[in-house]
Amino acid sequence: MTERLLNRTKCHNPYCHAPIEMPDAIHREVGSYLSRSAMRGDFVGVACGECKHAYPYSIAEFHAAGMSDTPDPFHSGKLNLFHVYLECGNEDCEFLAGVFAPRPTHVQLDDLSAELGEWVVVGVRCACGMISLSPKPFSLHHREPGSDDSTEATTWKQRRFSYPPPEHGS
């Protein structure tokens, strides 16, 4: 088997430290990064599935995990990848900051939508420099399993919703 970058780090929440893994394609897509000027470097926003805290993670931090000969969990059907846009703390701002949410494959759009009210966003900044807010996500996207990560034509399903999410059965 060919070696690949492991792209794994630990949650930044000092009480959690769950493993956080991202597909390599996200690190290669500059459009996936948070604003370089606002964040002062190359960072992606990621929400931990265990503690529901979203932090900025440096690309170098993921790459420091080294190499692995295990299959990529996003290609082998073990992890799904979602993306959520957060509203800026400045009401007049027209920019959005995005946060990724890697989750096990049994988690679907409705499951993640229901979880969003539990999120705590820490240190994720909008392009204008203001802190992004939780829990007011603008939209939710799901990367289709089996998407070709080597192209920018990756398939995303989108779900728009109001906040708070509607109660099940209503």
Image: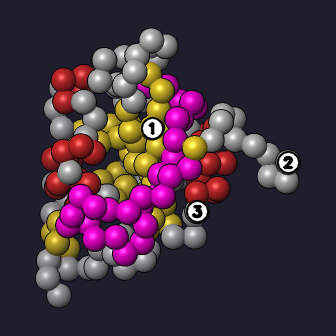
Q: From this viewpoint, is residue 16 visible?
A: no
x and y percentages locating residue 24 in the rendered image:
22, 61
Specify which label sits upstream in the sequence, 3 or 1: 1
Q: Which residue is mark 2?
A: 170
Magenta segment range? 132-159
Tell me which residue sits at (28%, 71%) in the image. 148
Specify which label sits upstream in the sequence, 2 or 1: 1
Specify which label sits upstream in the sequence, 3 or 2: 3
Q: Nearer the viewer, residue 86 or 94?
A: 94
Q: Residues within 10 Å of mark 2 (few under 14, many from 20)?
A: few
Q: Which disc is residue 85 wearing? A: 1
Residue 21 horizontal side relative to residue 161, left or right? left
Tell me which residue sits at (64%, 56%) in the image. 110
x and y percentages locating residue 117 in the rendered image:
64, 38
Q: Which residue is mark 3?
A: 108
Q: CA distance from mark 3 to mark 1?
A: 17 Å
